[in-house]
Image (cartoon, rainbow, N blue to C red):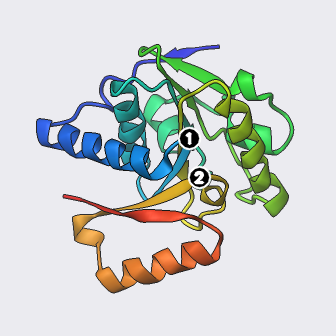
């Protein structure tokens, strides 16, 4: 098991911290006793949300389930030997072997792993439900960064779509939300980042 320092990623302005804290409170109300929320469109925002749950006292695990985008592997320069979500989906990794500790004892990470062929079958994506179930007994919250199609998000209790303000269009967001709901995602709402 290894550890990473998350201080640079979770640095926020006071206004940004306040917005994430408000989002956490809203999600706690919406999710009630359920634990797992998926974030679509912004992996770094998903990670900041996970950290914000920690700041309210929740032991949290962040799962980078956006298999088509290896943002965190690149950010930490962790290389191709790192086991992650893709290894679990393919049956070559055990859930607890995937956990990366951080310098905050209440926040752990599971990285994507490496997907050389870029293909995830429906059966492999369904393994995410099993992974979430395993971690549900150990963590207060599970925050998942999901792929744009919601293949991973549909196994979470709720989904939040995040847009940067410059990319947001009301009609496009509404159509996208409907598409995700048709893909069995429980969309709780849309968040617009300034």
Front position in the image: 90 or 74 = 90
Q: Which residue is mark 1?
A: 35
How far across and how far down the image is residue 187, in percent? Answer: 50, 65
Q: Earlier in the sequence, mark 1 or mark 2?
A: 1
Q: Measured along the vertical axis of the image, is residue 66 above or below residue 136?
A: below
Q: SS of the residue at dot 2?
A: loop
How far across and how far down the image is residue 116, in percent? Answer: 72, 49
- On residue 181, the disc is none
Q: Are marks 1 and 2 in contact (CB under 8 Å)?
A: yes
Front position in the image: 189 or 144 = 189
Can the viewer see residue 11? Answer: yes
What's the residue at 24%, 31% (across, down)?
11
Quarter of the picture containing the C terminus is: bottom left
Quarter of the picture containing the N terminus is: top right
Q: Which residue is mark 2?
A: 157
User: Viewed as shown, does residue 167 lie left or right of 109?
Assistant: left
Can the viewer see residue 69? Answer: no
């Amino acid at each position: 098991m290894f550890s990473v320092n998350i201080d640079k990623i979770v640095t926020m302005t006071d206004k940004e911290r306040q917005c994430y804290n408000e989002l956490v409170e809203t999600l706690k109300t919406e999710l009630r006793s359920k634990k797992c929320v998926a974030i679509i469109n912004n992996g770094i925002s998903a990670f900041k949300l996970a950290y914000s749950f920690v700041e309210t006292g929740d032991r949290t695990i962040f799962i980078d389930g956006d298999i088509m985008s290896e943002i965190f592997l690149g950010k930490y320069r962790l290389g191709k030997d790192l086991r992650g979500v893709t290894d679990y989906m393919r049956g070559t990794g055990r859930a607890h072997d995937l956990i990366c500790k951080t310098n905050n004892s209440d926040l752990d990470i599971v990285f994507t792993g490496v997907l050389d062929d870029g293909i995830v079958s429906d059966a492999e994506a369904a393994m995410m439900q099993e992974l979430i179930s395993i971690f549900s007994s150990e963590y207060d919250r599970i925050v998942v960064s999901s792929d744009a199609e919601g293949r991973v998000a549909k196994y979470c209790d709720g989904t939040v779509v995040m847009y940067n303000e410059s990319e947001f269009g009301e009609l496009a967001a509404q159509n996208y939300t409907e598409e995700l709901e048709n893909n069995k995602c429980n969309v709780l709402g849309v968040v617009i980042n300034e």
